[in-house]
Amino acid sequence: MSSWESSKLNRAGLSGIALIALVLILPYLAGARDLEFEKSIIEKFLPYQKWEKEYRAYFQRHYHDDSLELAPKAIVMHYTASATMTSAYNTFRNGAPYDDGDVGVVFGHLSSHFIIDNDGKIYQILPLSRKCRGAYGVNHVAISIEMAALNEASLLKNRKLINSSHELVRYLAEKYNIPGDKVYGHYQVAKGRKVVPEYTDYGDRRSPDCYPASFGRSDPGERYMTGLWEYLKKNTHNGKR
């Protein structure tokens, strides 16, 4: 064997070793990234234990299942229509009268799993094992994320908020193996079963397959969602739509 051939084999061997090392180290790097990200999330839980009776009755009415344990299969994005997370958090905590379908107007507590403030800080306000009341029609399967923004225009101007939301959705999609086509905007959920096959509502005979027309939603907007889906395609294993 010539010295050139020997050198070529050595280079091939080293390349193979480098490839194996890269394959072995990538999961570690991904895990380290997620661990660091988890540390950045601020826990500020709502008093959800006090709402158990209310929530069990709600889930029984609308989903025919009073279990409060969540096995996430989708993610729904919202904006708060307020400037800061504090306003949305207090609205959730304090409760208010809501139209609840066949039973009429009742006092209750809406909720989400996360609120991202306008400075990009992420607050977790419910355990991920607990169902929330953030996206009527898919609360039985979905993680809900609120972003502190008045509307889509203000959301699109806030790069810190967008970046934090992208990273949070990436983390959750990887953690629960949620594909990109199960990451929805609230406006899509409002259109009901024709757009979101998971949509379920046994508790509103006025409009069992979608939101009533007067309850339509526009958040968080198509431009924001298009950017999020593009990010997930590039940064998750299962991000294709």
Image (cartoon, rainbow, N blue to C red):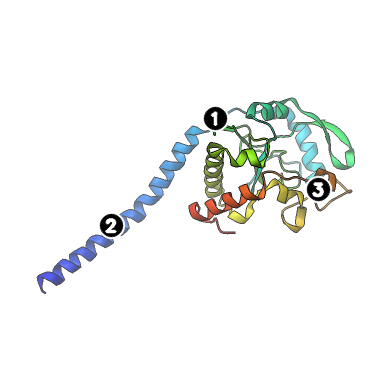
Residue 1 horizontal side relative to residue 240, left or right: left
Residue 217 horizontal side relative to residue 16, left or right: right
Residue 29 horizontal side relative to residue 183, left or right: left
Front residue of this view, candidates 216 and 192: 216
* Three-letter code, disc 2: Ala
Q: Mark 1, mark 3: which one is toward the viewer?
A: 3
- Circle 2 SS class: helix
| Residue at numbered disc 3 | 211
Q: Which residue is drawn at 89% across and 38% down?
A: 103
Mark yes or no: residue 145 visible.
no
| Residue at numbered disc 2 | 18
| Residue at numbered disc 1 | 42
* Three-letter code, disc 1: Ile
Q: Do the residues labelled 1 and 2 touch (CB within 8 Å)?
A: no
* Three-letter code, disc 3: Tyr
- Judge whether 122 appears above or below 219 on screen: above
Dot placed on the residue nearer the N-terminal end, 1 or 2: 2
- Circle 3 SS class: loop
- Judge whether 191 appears above or below 124 on screen: below
- Circle 1 SS class: strand
Q: How far apart are marks 1 and 3 (CA)?
A: 32 Å
Q: Residue at x 41, y 41 (%)?
A: 32
Could you tell me residue 129's position as x and y percent? 62, 39
Q: Quadrant of the C terminus?
A: bottom right
Categorize mark 1 by other alpha carbons within 10 Å: few (<14), some (14-19), many (20+).
Answer: some
Front residue of this view, candidates 79 and 58: 79
- Judge whether 8 appears above or below 53 on screen: below
Categorize mark 2 by other alpha carbons within 10 Å: few (<14), some (14-19), many (20+).
Answer: few
Front residue of this view, candidates 218 and 142: 218
Q: Do the residues labelled 1 and 3 touch (CB within 8 Å)?
A: no
